[in-house]
Image (spheres, rainbow, N blue to C red):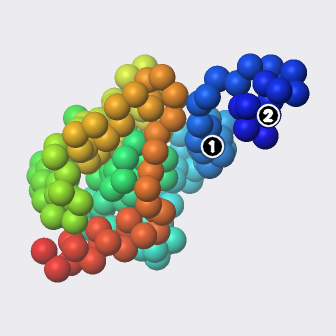
């Protein structure tokens, strides 16, 4: 029913707004993929490297860290750089892990910029639950590509993020470009 039909039928006044449904986000809201505890056996960032790249959404593997697409991205290409080792805090990284994490983050930005013409990036870590880490037990750095006006009012007013591409398609594009780069 459109707004005019609703009004004519006396059901109520329509607001003239379009609805954007994102039912896939409900899994995140309900915490369906969150580990039951902080142990290494429950950790998705420990499990992902055991999967093949497509199933795990892995776009790049390094010696000590890997890059994986975020299952609940803020924007297309939102990925995370994670050490293989199950550590929670950045201060726990070895010098080699910290260096490779920085290098892979830099490579991720170059790759994402080349395939998507991103105008900027949000890069960062949420250390601990209090700081907003969804999975605080395993260190991960977010790399979020941004474009002018990309999210504008949607997350603020509509509490919705728009993603124009399937994660599997994004993974393939980024992984291919990374290898070619």
x, y (%) of residue 181?
13, 74
Give the number of the mark in front: 2 or 1.
Answer: 2
x, y (%) of residue 48?
47, 62
- Indicate left or right for 8 with 27 as reference: right
Secondary structure at numbered mark 2: helix
Around disc 2, counting alpha carbons within 10 Å, would you say few (fewer than 14), some (14 to 19), or many (20 or more)? few
Mark 2 — residue? Answer: 5
Q: In the rendered view, would you say 6 is above or below 43? A: above
Q: Residue at x 54, y 44 (%)?
A: 39
- Indicate left or right for 94 with 38 as reference: left
Q: CA distance from mark 2 to mark 1?
A: 21 Å
Residue 27 appears in the rendering: no
Q: In the rendered view, would you say 60 is above or below 118? A: below
Q: Residue at x 18, y 57 (%)?
A: 117
x, y (%) of residue 20?
58, 41
Question: Which part of the image, by quadrant, shows the N terminus?
Answer: top right
> In the image shown, does 146 or 142 lie closer to the viewer?
146
Toward the front, the furthest residue is 8
> In the image shown, does 142 or 17 lie closer to the viewer?
17
- Indicate left or right for 90 with 58 as reference: left
> In the image shown, does 134 or 150 lie closer to the viewer?
150
Q: How many marks?
A: 2
What label does residue 21 carry, if any?
1
- Indicate left or right for 164 with 122 as reference: right
Q: Residue at x 13, y 54 (%)?
A: 106
Q: Residue at x 83, y 27 (%)?
A: 8
Of the numbered discs 2 and 1, the one sitting upstream in the chain is: 2
Q: In the rendered view, would you say 145 is above or below 10? A: below
Name the image quarter holding residue 125.
top left
């Amino acid at each position: 029913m459109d707004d005019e039909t609703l009004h004519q039928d006396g059901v109520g006044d329509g607001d003239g707004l379009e609805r954007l449904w994102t039912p896939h986000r409900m899994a995140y809201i309900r915490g369906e993929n969150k580990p039951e505890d902080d142990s290494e056996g429950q950790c998705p960032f420990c499990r992902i490297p055991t999967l093949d790249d497509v199933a795990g959404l892995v776009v790049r593997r390094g010696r000590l860290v890997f890059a994986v697409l975020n299952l609940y991205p803020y924007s297309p290409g939102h990925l995370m750089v994670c050490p293989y080792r199950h550590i929670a805090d950045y201060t726990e990284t070895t010098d080699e892990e910290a260096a490779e994490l920085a290098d892979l983050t830099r490579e991720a930005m170059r790759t994402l910029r080349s395939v998507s013409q991103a105008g900027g990036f949000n890069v960062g870590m949420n250390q601990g639950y209090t700081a907003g880490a969804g999975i605080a037990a395993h260190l991960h750095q977010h790399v979020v590509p941004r474009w002018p006006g990309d999210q504008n009012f949607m997350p603020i007013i509509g509490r919705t993020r728009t993603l124009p591409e399937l994660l599997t398609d994004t993974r393939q594009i980024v992984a291919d470009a990374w290898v070619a780069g």
